[in-house]
């Protein structure tokens, strides 16, 4: 990953009549990073992607990829991108290989040795007509066409859709490899475990507005986590409750359970100063929890 | 019957029917206004057999002439086309859209679904026929035209039964094959052949009864508008409709439902044959996807094969010997008929007493432009809107190509197919003329075929422009076909009335047959106007397509 910006949006806004699908979206995705783009259905993820790719035109604001304006230089941009649309549809009457040949002809410069490698890794069947394939196998054809030109930027909207867990792992490995080689990956997904596993940073969008933009590690550190503490003797819960970031405290003899939202270092310092701690365990916060936390907070604020 | 399915189907379709009926009523207004101002003696002095052939009732007056041509041709075709569209979509359409599984995931039988859709089709077609019935006295009243003793109720009933027959035919084919395109195409072919056959066989001595083999014969052969309900004719269509409905029910219950609609083309079949696999694999595989226009062309092979066959063999080669078999005494009357009269059948004015005039009326009058339009409108409408409807446009445009290139390559496929239909028409008519010893100038045949290609291309380009502007296949198809119908009618009727004659020039059809190219040769000015219109519409398509957001669904 470098500090260069691969995808940039400035006050990107898209209205459909009275519906504000995207509102003043400011976003920077660095070159070589895997950027997870999260949000519930209808939040504006697909609208963002379609605007970036010039499928639809912004009401106001701009988007650029690799420093090129997404509308003015859309053809030049598309020379450098791979794209997997959400709800992927292909030509049912073409075989997988015909489909890839079609796009390779339009694009030019596709290395068929790499296509074969991708086909093998994703265990895709390119001999059958796409219309006869299961949704997962059809998705594999879509993934190969996105990767096959070794793009500088990969834009993927729900790319794991229909893939079995084993194939999801293979796909995630592939994503990490291309990112390590310098490709920027813009990953819109509902599969939070996948984003958590591969993404460097995530952006969370709601009602067309970006409500969070942070590194996954940083988000984790802020998330509420369940903490179990074992003391060498009985503890009064009223001592724990006023501690900053602590909530939902329950105590059973020497065992205290609590939810903690803050820096672990601070909590440990306060507790160990006052008590003799025998053991401590925390349940790692996952992205789902973080996601839900953000949305709950937003709902409360709203 | 399922009320929900019935209601949804009716709700999805009523607009198309309403627009069609309103358009037909307006056209009737125009036709009646034209007939009101002309001397009708040209009709009444014609031989009875000729009047009968042209569908002109005895004792024709303004109202019966206008209603005869508007309802007997345009109305009957429009109602039948809407019924075919609903019939073919009833099961095959749901399969193509991938919604049949969800629909039948409910605890309802296939029979119930089909019956509900059939009921919706019958209701809408019935309402359409009733509205046409009601529109006639209304229009006559506005223009102060006397309706006389016309049996409009009987005529409306004939229109209804005729339309649902074709609807059930399409439904049966769709129910057995799951292919909507095949169901619509075959039914349209049966309709077109019947229309032509009913016009030709009765004037071939000894072959008069062959017309009875074609369903169109039972629509208004007995002149229900004058003579009232023809129960014999109606029974034939009604019994056939019931049989077809039964066949549809058996079909839909017997076969496996299709998932995503994967058609098998001729090339696909050859590709799977070990004898031809090697060569065809290259052709059907790598070559087919080498360019956007080649892929677009390959998707419509079936359409081209059927259309080209029809124009080459049926409307071209066969017509030559058939002309020789016709009753020449009867045809000799034709040269006494004022040319304007041919506007009555929308023929543009061919003189049937000559072979060239005969070909001009039968082959080039309606069938040739229709054949070219079938190809160009389908390709034009589906070119952009089809990709958007199938959600493949986003992926296609993720490649480093301009929107204008996608559009122009698809327009190129449309042009090539139009030219192919034109060439087959030319070859068929030339051969027919040779076999029949008719001696029509080969250059004139080429000129007329070329103009037919161009006029078909104008409406294909219009479909492309509508497709580019809206991203909706239905709007592009119905919009361009509707405009074509109106222009055809404007051209036919405007020439009957001096005050309206100038209006004919706004219709692209006036640049096609009005100078009788089969007799007089090519009119390059007309060709240039038609070609220019096509270029302008394609250019407009580029501008419209570049400006708008892509649709996610059709």
Image: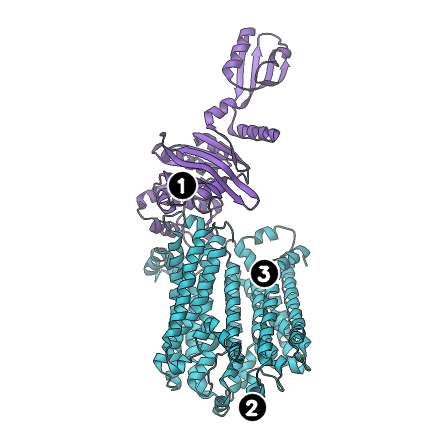
In front of the other: B387 or A60:
A60
Compared across the picture, whether B346 is left or right of B148 comes to left
Q: Secondary structure at mark 3?
A: loop
Residue B219, image x, y percentages: 60, 77
Callout 1 crowding tier (Cα within 10 Å): few <14, some 14–19, many ≥20: many
Q: Which mark is residue B90?
A: 3
Direction front: furthest residue: B499
- Examine the rendered structure and indicate whether residue B90 appears above or below residue A135: below
Q: Earlier in the sequence, mark 3 or mark 2?
A: 2
Q: CA distance from mark 2 to mark 1?
A: 77 Å
For mark 2, what is the residue? B47
Q: Secondary structure at mark 1?
A: loop
Compared across the picture, whether A3 is left or right of B485 comes to left
Q: Colour of chain B?
A: cyan
Q: Are marks 2 and 1 in contact (CB under 8 Å)?
A: no
Residue A96, image x, y percentages: 40, 50
For mark 1, what is the residue? A122
């Amino acid at each position: 990953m470098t500090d260069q910006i691969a995808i940039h949006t400035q006050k990107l806004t898209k209205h459909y009549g009275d519906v504000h699908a995207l509102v003043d979206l400011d976003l920077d995705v660095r070159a070589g990073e895997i950027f997870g783009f999260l949000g519930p259905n209808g939040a504006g993820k697909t609208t963002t992607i379609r605007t970036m790719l010039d499928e639809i035109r912004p009401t106001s604001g701009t988007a650029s990829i690799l420093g090129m304006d997404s509308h003015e230089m859309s053809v030049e941009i598309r020379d450098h991108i791979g794209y997997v649309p959400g709800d992927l549809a292909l030509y049912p009457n073409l075989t997988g290989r015909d489909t890839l040949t079609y796009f390779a002809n339009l694009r030019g410069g596709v290395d068929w040795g790499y296509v074969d490698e991708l086909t093998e890794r994703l265990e895709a069947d390119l001999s059958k007509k796409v219309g006869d394939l299961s949704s997962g196998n059809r998705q594999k054809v879509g993934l190969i066409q996105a990767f096959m030109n070794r793009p500088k930027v990969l834009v993927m909207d729900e790319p794991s859709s229909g893939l079995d867990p084993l194939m999801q792992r293979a796909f995630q490995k592939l994503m990490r490899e291309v990112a390590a080689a310098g490709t920027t990956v813009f990953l819109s997904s509902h599969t939070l475990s996948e984003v958590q596993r591969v993404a460097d940073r995530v952006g969370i969008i709601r009602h067309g507005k970006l409500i969070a933009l942070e590194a996954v590690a940083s988000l984790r550190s802020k998330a509420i986590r369940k903490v179990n503490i074992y003391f060498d003797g009985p503890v009064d819960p009223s001592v724990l409750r006023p501690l900053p970031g602590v909530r939902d405290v329950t105590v059973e003899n020497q065992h205290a359970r609590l939810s903690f939202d803050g820096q672990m270092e601070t909590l440990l310092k306060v507790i160990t100063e006052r008590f003799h701690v025998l053991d401590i365990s925390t349940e790692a916060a996952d992205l789902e929890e973080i996601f839900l936390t953000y949305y709950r907070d937003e709902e409360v604020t709203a | 019957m399922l009320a929900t399915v019935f209601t949804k189907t009716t709700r999805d379709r009523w607009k198309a029917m309403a627009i069609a009926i309103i358009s037909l009523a307006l056209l009737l207004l125009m036709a009646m206004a034209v007939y009101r101002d002309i001397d009708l003696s040209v009709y009444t002095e014609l031989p009875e057999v000729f009047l009968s052939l042209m569908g002109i009732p005895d004792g024709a007056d303004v109202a019966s002439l206008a209603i005869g041509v508007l309802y007997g041709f345009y109305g009957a075709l429009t109602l039948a086309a809407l019924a075919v569209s609903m019939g073919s979509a009833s099961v095959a359409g749901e399969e193509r859209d991938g919604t049949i599984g969800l629909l039948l995931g409910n605890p309802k039988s296939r029979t119930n679904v089909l019956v509900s859709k059939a009921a919706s089709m019958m209701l809408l077609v019935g309402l359409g026929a009733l509205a046409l019935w009601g529109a006639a006295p209304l229009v006559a009243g506005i223009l102060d035209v006397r309706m006389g003793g016309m049996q409009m109720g009987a005529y409306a009933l004939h229109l209804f039964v005729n339309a649902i027959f074709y609807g059930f035919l399409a439904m049966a084919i769709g129910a057995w094959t799951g292919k909507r395109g095949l169901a619509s195409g075959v039914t349209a072919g049966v309709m077109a052949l019947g229309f032509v056959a009913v016009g030709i066989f009765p004037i071939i001595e000894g072959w008069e009864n062959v017309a009875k083999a074609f369903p169109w014969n039972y629509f208004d052969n007995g002149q229900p508008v004058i003579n009232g309900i023809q129960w014999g004719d109606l029974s034939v269509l009604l019994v056939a409709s019931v049989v077809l409905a039964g066949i549809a029910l058996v079909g839909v219950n017997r076969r496996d439902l299709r998932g995503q609609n994967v058609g098998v083309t001729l090339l696909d079949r050859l590709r799977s044959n070990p004898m031809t696999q090697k060569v065809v694999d290259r052709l059907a595989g790598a070559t087919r996807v080498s360019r956007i226009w080649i892929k677009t062309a390959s998707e419509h092979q079936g359409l081209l094969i059927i259309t080209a066959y029809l124009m080459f063999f049926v409307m071209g080669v066969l017509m030559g010997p058939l002309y020789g078999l016709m009753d020449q005494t009867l045809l000799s009357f034709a040269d006494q008929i004022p040319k304007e009269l041919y506007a009555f059948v929308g023929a543009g004015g061919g003189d049937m007493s000559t072979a060239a005039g005969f070909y001009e009326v039968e082959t080039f009058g309606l069938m040739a432009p229709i054949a070219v339009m079938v190809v160009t409108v389908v390709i034009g409408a589906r070119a952009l809107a089809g990709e958007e409807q199938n959600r493949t446009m986003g992926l296609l445009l993720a490649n480093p190509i301009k929107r204008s290139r996608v559009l122009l390559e698809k327009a190129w496929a449309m042009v090539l197919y139009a030219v192919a239909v034109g060439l087959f028409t030319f070859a068929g008519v030339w051969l027919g003329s040779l076999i029949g010893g008719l001696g029509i100038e080969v250059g004139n045949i080429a000129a007329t075929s070329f103009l037919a290609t161009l006029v078909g291309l104008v409406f294909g380009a219009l479909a492309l422009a509508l497709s580019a502007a809206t991203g909706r296949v239905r709007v592009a198809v119905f919009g361009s076909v509707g405009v074509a119908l109106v222009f055809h009618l404007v051209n036919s009727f405007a020439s009957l009335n001096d005050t309206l004659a100038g209006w004919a020039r706004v219709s692209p059809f006036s640049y096609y047959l009005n100078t009788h190219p089969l007799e007089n040769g090519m009119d390059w000015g007309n060709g240039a106007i038609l070609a220019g219109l096509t270029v302008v519409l394609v250019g407009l398509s580029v501008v419209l397509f570049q400006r708008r957001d892509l649709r996610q669904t059709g």
